[in-house]
Amino acid sequence: MLDEIIEFIQVIGPVFVIIWILTIAFAIFRPQRYLNSILLMAALMITMLFISGLFGNTLMPYMLLACIALAALALFLVPVLLVINGIQLIRRESLALPHLLSLGLGIVIGIGEIAAVVYVFGLYDSSRLENANLWILLLAATVFYFSFLVLCFVLYSVFIQLMPHRMNFRYVIIHGCGLSGGEKMTKLLSNRVDKAIEIYNKCRIKPIIIPSGGQGPDEKLSEAQAMKDYLLNHGIPEKHIVLEDRSATTRENLANSKEIIDGRGGARRIALVSSNYHVYRCLRLAREVGLKCTGIGAKVAFYFWPSALIREFIAIFLTKRFIIWSLIGYLIFISPILYGLFN
C-alpha cells in the first residue's frame, strides 16, 4: 500500500503543488480576475483527488465517493439556505427587490436541481414525455452552469479574505455607504471604519486614512464626514485623515481617492476597506481606474451576506465582457443537448 501511495504522490503531487502555487500567485498579484475563481475551484478538486489518493488504491474510490456525496449534499442545501436567507431578510429588513434575490435564486436553483434528479434517476414517464427529458436536462444543465459560476465567485470571495497581508500600508481607503436617518453611520459602515482603525493600529508607520463617500440628497452630511467624526472619536489624529466627499458611486470613490493619493506624491501600499462581500468588485473597479491596492473586508451580519454577495455577482455578471465570455461558455457547455433537441 505504501508503494501505491508513493507512486500516486509522484504522479499527482507536482500537479497539486503547481496549481496551488498558481492560484495563490494570481490571487496576490492579479486578485481582480474572475479566472482566479475557476483556478481555485480546479485546485480544490485536485486537492480532493490528492487527499483521496493518500488512502491507497483500495480505499481511494470510497474516499472520492464520500467527497462527491458531501459536495452533492452541500449543493442541495444551497437552495434551502438561500430560501431561508431570503425569508430572514424580508422579515428583518423589508419586502424589497434586492431582498427577494436570495429567495428567488433559491427557488430557481431548487427547481433546476429537482430537474437534474428527475433526469438522472429517470423519474419521468418516458412514454408520455417522449423527448421532453432533453428539455429537463437542458434546465438542469443551465442551473448547474450558472450555479457553478456563482459558487466559484463565492469561494474566491471568501478565499481572498483569508489571504495574509503585511500591515505596512501608506493609505487606507474606506468605502462609504448610506447613513441612517441621513446623519448616523449604519452598522455596515461602522464595521468598515472599525476595520480601517484596526489596520491603522497595526501599521508601524501610521497611514493616511481616506474616508470616501459624498452627501446624498437625503443626507445631512457626507458619508466621509460621518466617518471622519467617528475616526476622531476613536483616537485617530486629524492629520492622518483626508476626506474624499465628492463621490456618489464605488467607481468615483476609487477614482477620487486615487486623485488624492497621486496629488500627495502617490504610493504603492494602499489598503481598500469595504464590507467583505464587496471587496472583489472593488478590486475590479480599482483596476479599471488604475489604482493598485489590497482589498480587506469588514464583517457583516451573516443573514445579510448571501443576498449581498448575489447582488455583487449580478453586478459583475452584467458587465459586457463577463456576459460575452459566460454566454460563450454556456453555449459550449449545452451544445450536445442543443444538438439532440434540434436534430
Image (cartoon, rainbow, N blue to C red):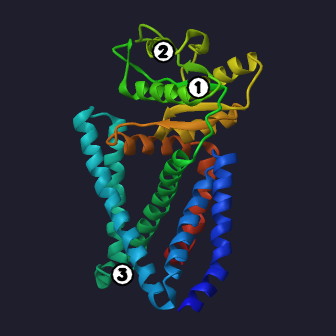
Residue for badge 3: 130
In this orientation, which residue lies closer to the viewer: 253 or 264?
Answer: 264
| Residue drawn at the location 59% of the way across and 49% of the way down | 323
Position of residue 187 measured from the top left corner of the image (x, y, whole percent): 36, 26
- Pointer 1 with pointer 2, Cβ within 8 A: no
Q: Is residue 129 above or below residue 221?
A: below
Looking at the image, residue 278 sits to the left or right of residue 75; the answer is right
Residue 30 appearing in the image: no
SS category of the residue bearing label 1: strand
Q: Quadrant of the C terminus?
A: bottom right
* Residue 129, position as x, y percentages in the image: 32, 78
Residue at coordinates 56% horizontally, 30% vertically from top-left?
202
**Dot 2 lies on which element?**
loop
Kindly check if marks 3 and 2 are in contact, taking CB atoms under 8 A apart as contact: no
Quick check: can you spot residue 157?
yes
Would you say the residues marked 3 and 1 are in contact, meaning their CB atoms lie under 8 Å apart? no
In the image, is residue 313 above or below residue 119? Answer: above
Circle 2 packing at 10 Å, graded few (<14), some (14-19), many (20+), is: few
Instruction: Mark 3 vs mark 1: give the one in front.
Output: 1
Determine the image quadrant of residue 2.
bottom right
Mark 3 crowd level (few <14, some 14–19, many ≥20, 10 Å Cα): few
Camera-nearest label, 3 or 2? 2
Q: Residue furthest front?
A: 204
Q: Amino acid at mark 1?
A: Ile
Disc on the earlier residue, 3 or 1: 3
Q: Residue 173: which disc?
A: 1
What amino acid does circle 3 point to? Answer: Glu
Based on the displayed image, in which of its 4 quarters is residue 101 positioned?
top left
| N-terminal-most mark, 1 or 2 | 1
Q: Label 2 belongs to which residue?
A: 235
Q: Which residue is drawn at the image coordinates 45% and 79% (left, top)?
A: 64
Measure the alpha-carbon separation of dots 3 and 1. Answer: 60 Å
